[in-house]
Amino acid sequence: MVRIGSRRSNLAMTQTGLIADRLRAMGHEVEIVEIVTEGDTNRAPLTQLGGTGIFATAIRNALRDNRIDLTVHSLKDLPVAPAPGLTIAAIPARADARDALIARDGLTLGELPAGAVVGTGSPRRVAQLAALGLGLETREIRGNIDRRIDFVRGGELDAIVLARAGMSRVGRLEEITETIDPLQMLPAPGQGALALELRSDDEALIEVVRQLDDADTRAAVTAERAVLARLEAGCSAPLGALAEVTEDVDGSLEISLRAFVGRTDGTFDLRRSQTGPFDQPEQLGHDVAELLLADGALDAFPSDEQAPEPTPGGLLPRDADPVTVHHPQAPRSVKK
């Protein structure tokens, strides 16, 4: 029996159910165990609670205490620092990483009038909305998908921005009025991807779970999270990143990475991009982070919460890898 721990929100249970179904199809018995996290019970803004890691702490404690065997995280909610005693054994194929708008009257971002109020709990989204110069106002909101959509339906907000992947997984794509182009809004590092975490000493289950790993997704999110690891300054650092696996002219796999850093008031924004080898995603993430730093990314950080000083060669210490993954030996897939 594999006990999978999950937050009890509809989205979390749906994502956990997807993995449970895949394990059952492989011949394993599965039980889903509901776990309440601080992020589920405390309605304060994430910037006050200490970031999205609050969703992972209770579940990780349950893993360490052997109350569950496996958990399914939204990777964008997972801190970049590895958790002692735990391993991300698989990152399955990613869903659409883009953000999505749900607006009154079926409006798109460009059709929202100046002064329209857009709800989001993400400083990253606030900063990129401000950078578009559309004259939109933003309001801090939290809650599950239903609660957020109700703000629009009830007329309290003109629109909200959510991850398209979440809307897809709960079967509500028809309510999206616009899927936002990454040229306008880059997603959070790891957005749309799931991380399957378990105890590092559970070798038998690791061998099972690693079969669900997707090499392209793992490479892309490793590059994105390497940017975050280098520029990490808590929730007050609005940062977006998106990596995509492509082929060069010779047919070799490579990774194209774009990143954004900005201020939530729209007075500063910076975008940089670079392409690198498929087998060096972490180095690519570090390189893009160094480009951002060289061009003034520190200006996006509050004066009391600076990004770390560059390390020699632009690399993080070896004990600060952005994600710890058991690499499967399956051949890499090719994105056409």
Image (cartoon, grey):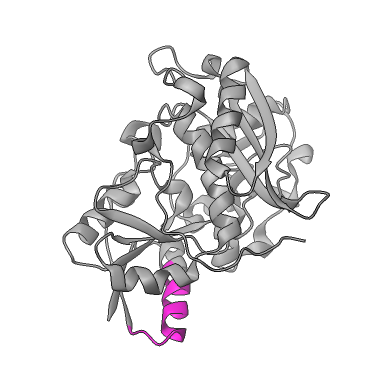
Question: From the viewer's perspective, is 306 left or right of 262?
Answer: left
Taking the spot 60% from the left edge, 67% from the top edge, the residue there is: 331
Tell me, yes or no, if residue 288 can be seen here: yes
Against 148, residue 229 (above or below) is above
Q: Quadrant of residue 33?
A: bottom left
Q: Quadrant of residue 64?
A: bottom left
Against 1, residue 203 (above or below) is above
Quarter that holds the N terminus: bottom left
Name the residue at the left extreme.
65
Q: Is residue 25 magenta?
A: yes
Q: Position of residue 90 (x, y in %)?
A: 44, 62
Question: From the viewer's perspective, is 61 left or right of 95?
Answer: left
Front position in the image: 140 or 257: 257
Front position in the image: 169 or 193: 193
Name the residue at the bottom extreme.
27
Q: Magenta region: which residues?
A: 16-29
Quarter that holds the C terminus: bottom right
Q: Predominant secondary structure in magenta?
A: helix
Taking the spot 40% from the left edge, 30% from the top edge, the residue there is: 234
Taking the spot 60% from the left edge, 45% from the top edge, the residue there is: 161
Q: Position of residue 54 (x, y in %)?
A: 32, 44
Looking at the rendered structure, the number of numbered marks drawn on it comes to 0
